[in-house]
């Protein structure tokens, strides 16, 4: 029985990986299976045993639509998170108001401060 060969692209599709992954592995474990035919790199199909092929039942589980119970739970969690965000925003708003009130000077503190005396430079004092 004569071995069957596939191009790198065809082999990558059969193995379920990218062509880049095939080119990387051609230098290591796929090297015995690689041959060049008419200046095209071909890989023996026996090399597929080095790749884990997904079984149909695994593919079916991956393609299975979302369960309505899971979606309902996620919506409940989103509602809880929305409430938490709203409470945090209110807390931040209160803190901002408190900081603004704290930073604003009161009238009593302004009147108790002594007036600043303007200092004269050395030459202005010297000229007198």
Image (spheres, grey):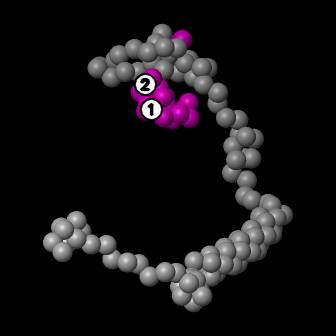
Q: Is residue 34 above or below residue 23?
A: above
7 displayed left or right of 49: left
Res 58 visible = yes
As drawn, the label of residue 96 is none
> As drawn, is 85 to the left or to the right of 11?
right
**Identity of the residue drawn at 60% across and 25% down:** 51
**Position in image of residue 60 (x %, y %):** 72, 47
Pick the residue in front: 72 or 112: 112
| Residue 19 - label | 1
Quadrant the C terminus occupies: bottom left
Residue 104: which quarter of the image?
Answer: bottom right
Mark 1 Cα shell of 10 Å, populated few (<14), some (14-19), many (≥20): some
Secondary structure at badge 1 equals helix
- Residue 67 at what x, y percent from top left? 79, 60
- Residue 43: name its quadrant: top left
Residue 4 drawn in magenta: yes
Task: Please name the residue shown 44% across and 15% down the image.
Answer: 27
Q: In the rendered view, tell whether residue 117 sits above or below residue 19.
A: below
Q: Is residue 91 magenta?
A: no
Residue at the spot of label 2 = 23
Q: Is residue 68 visible?
A: no
Q: What residue do we see at 48% from left, 34% from top?
A: 18
């Amino acid at each position: 029985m004569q071995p069957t060969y596939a191009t790198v692209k065809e082999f990558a599709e059969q193995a379920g990986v990218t062509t880049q992954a095939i080119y990387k592995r051609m230098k290591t474990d796929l090297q015995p299976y690689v041959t060049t035919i008419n200046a095209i790199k071909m890989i023996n199909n026996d090399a597929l045993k080095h790749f884990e092929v997904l079984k149909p039942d695994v593919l079916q589980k991956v393609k299975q639509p979302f369960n309505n119970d899971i979606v309902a739970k996620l919506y409940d969690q989103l509602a809880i998170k929305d409430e938490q965000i709203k409470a945090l925003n209110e807390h931040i708003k209160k803190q901002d108001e408190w900081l603004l009130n704290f930073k604003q000077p009161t009238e009593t503190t302004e009147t108790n401060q002594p007036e600043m005396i303007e200092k004269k430079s050395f030459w202005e004092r010297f000229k007198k």
